[in-house]
Amino acid sequence: MTTTTLTLILLIIMIAAFVLSSIKLKSPDISMAVAAVVLAIAGTIAVPALGSPVRYLVEGLFVNLDLALLFIAASIFVNIYSHSGAIAAITRMVVEKINNKWILLSIMGIMMLIPGALTGAGSVAIFVLGGLVNTVLEYLGISKKKRTVFICFFAMLSAACPPINLWTMLMTAQANMPYVGFTWLLLIPIVIAGAFTIIFIGWGAKPQSKEETLAKFPPKDPKLTWWRIVLPFVAIIALFLLALYDPWGLPVLGLPLMFLIAALVALLCNPKKTTAKQYLGILDDTMEQVFPLVANVLSIGVLQSAMAATGVRGLIGSTCVGLPLVLIYSLILVVGPICQGCFNYGVSIVLGGPLIFMFNTLGMDVTVICAALSLIFPLGDTLPPSRIVGRLACEETGYKESYIGFFKTLLIPMLVLGLMAVIMIIKPAAFAFLY
Amino acid sequence: MIFFENLIHILYFVMAGLVAFSMLKSLFKRKKNQGVVFDIMYAYCLIPFLLRVLYIK
């Protein structure tokens, strides 16, 4: 039996384990871990020289450990900041002061982008701002389905938004590329797609009574002064900028520690009397809130490790490299999101990395292509089996109707972003001026 | 600077320890994410944090 045939059999075993586990356990995260265990065992049976499968599984748990810590630290920051009432105060102020529907929708969109841009996870944007944005959109007279689409799409955009785009980070790490030059390449398509979505959602909506809407917000705390609202954000942005522009003047803090420092500033700026027990409660809630994401990135690490050890990753990579370009251009908008739905961030390793290598061998601008792929992959966050962002958006707005109906409406802004990304992949040189 | 680098190194171990403690607690008692599937997930997600705290890996 040739090596390719053996690896192909292992790939089929892995996919079968993943599909069966997904059907039985209804969780893509544990299904990835199960698929990895089955693959590692099958691999060591087929090639005994690989050694103990446990080694690959434990090593895999450490692949994305830093990402898991980042998720946890960022969510702690966002939840402590939110507990102080700062986010509600900002939203209340925005509704009170702004009467123009389009400006209000734009501000909601920008606000939705911030938590995901800082943490790399669109679900955090929904956890933190979903409820408030839903209230404001309801005030603007937007239907429940369109509200869900707005929250879901901006959450996906926020995950792709710089400075932290996990797909790009994972792909650049795999391809030994620096995570530099992606800001405008990611931001400009996001702004265009966001602007289109705002027009698409807001068209024809008639705002309701402002007083009724303001009554739904928590009461304003007089002790919550402007500096208490601004300081935690200033702290995190200052740390980002210092690390970026004065790397030798500052010890290497790492993103998780930066977020914890900002969380400490948010805690000190909190005007509410909060006991240590209440803070521990917030930490416990945060851990439960962020756990599915932590489990997801750790499971991906295990799967990556097992796939790399058994040669399955190499097989997928070499197959991708061998595909005709026309086929890649035509299928990437379908295959990319579907793989994202199955592997979540793992798509960057399974599909993104090999594609980067392939385009690199063709002499194309891989920075632009990497950014374009990072715009396509998040679209799969609404696709089964995981559909994390889609599911959360529906829960947040209380949308109980058909998921397909919601998805059809969502498909329009998704196509706008997807087509822009495909153009970037086809003509990367034309976008090189953006970095 | 070396002192600060060492301090940050220790802080990351403390962070891993706190996360491990929180996950261990959630493994036995939690409000959301109920069910056997999540029990298994909590158990295996705990492994890297525990190994890090115990200085094994």
Image (cartoon, coloured by chain):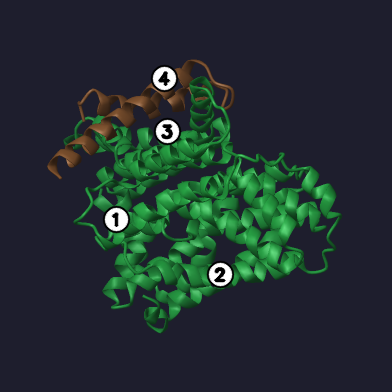
Mark closer to the chain start, 3 or 1: 3
Side of A407 relative to A339 (left or right): right
In the image, what residue occupies the spot 55% across and 59% down?
A157
- Look at label 2 and name its amino acid: Val
According to the picture, the residue beneath numbered tag 4 turns out to be: B24
- Chain shown in brown: B
| Chain identity of mark 2 | A
| Chain identity of mark 4 | B
In the image, what residue occupies the spot 39% across and 73% down?
A368
Q: Residue furthest bottom?
A: A430
- Look at label 3 and name its amino acid: Val
x then y, percent, for residue A6: 29, 47
Residue at disc 1, secondary structure:
helix
Mark closer to the chain start, 1 or 2: 2
According to the picture, the residue beneath numbered tag 1 turns out to be: A243
Q: Choose between A105 and A157: the one closer to the eye.
A: A105
